[in-house]
Image (tube, rainbow, N blue to C red):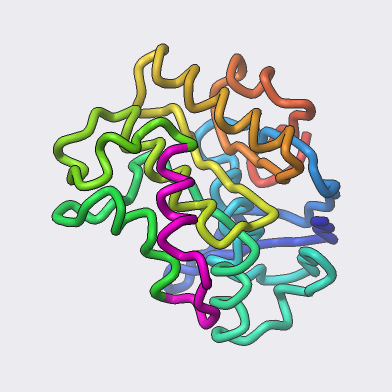
Amino acid sequence: MIDIVRVSKEYRFGRESFFALANISVKIEDGEYVAILGPSGSGKSTLMHLIGGLDRPTDGDLIVDNENLSELNDGELAEFRNKKVGFIFQSFNLIPNTSLYDNVSLPLVYSKHKLPDEKEKIRGLIDSVGLSHKTRNKPSQLSGGEQQRVAIARSLINDPQIILADEPTGNLDSKNGTEVMRILENLNKKGKTVIIVTHDQELAKETDRIIKLRDGKII
């Protein structure tokens, strides 16, 4: 599913530069449940952004589902993100003045392919995360755990094969964090490739494989 071959990511600030990732190679198989683990500044979020097509590597090849992301133009990358990747962020990234229903449906606005059963699918996803009774609520009317469940439902609307979760329990208490991890584990059991980015070793232990990063290198 994902083949990262000698990938580096360099950032430049005037005459200064540094490598967030330095010549890393790793494979993630279709249907794996993986944690990318490392302290702040280790390069784990950069790696997630590259896998998800949010950024481009400076060097190397990043092949996802037989597509080399390094060779795609901006439009092709946008289509890749919309069709093949679901993103779950620590800060939820919900639109404040929009209902739960409309937040879940948002990726469809950017999709070139209209779903024949669109409303049914949206309601089904909301129900799958236990929020069918709050369809018209806005994010401010939801708890942190409920907001993260909305973000999970939104990430699934285009039926992506890859789920990228960046510190998915970072803003949650232990009860809600456990519930979110249960949902992610169940998605993996249904065949999704789930990749969690975290600095929490206990959280990482709940996955099937841990990729450790430090100073932009796999250790």
The image quadrant where one finds the C terminus is: top right
Rendered view: 165 above or below 68: above
Q: How many marks?
A: 0
- Quadrant containing the N terminus is bottom right
Q: Is residue 5 above or below residue 155?
A: below
**Residue at (35, 35) in percent of width and height:** 131
Q: Nearer the viewer, residue 164 or 113?
A: 113
Q: Residue at x 34, y 42 (%)?
A: 91
Give left or right: position of 75 versus 29. Answer: left
Would you say 28 lies left or right of 77 here? Answer: right
Residue 218 position, x and y percent, is 76, 40
Depth order, front residue of 108/55 = 108
Looking at the image, which residue is at 80% across and 69% down? 61
Image: 3 above or below 139? below
Is 94 a magenta residue?
no
Q: From the top left corner, tell me how far across and down residue 142 is, in percent.
A: 22, 33
The residue depicted at 57 percent of the width and 67 percent of the height is 81
| Span highlighted in magenta in the image | 110-127
Give whichever of 27, 147 is nearer the camera.
147
Q: Position of residue 109 (x, y in %)?
A: 39, 74
Q: Quadrant of residue 137?
A: top left
Residue 122 forms part of the magenta stretch:
yes
Residue 198 percent coordinates (x, y): 55, 32
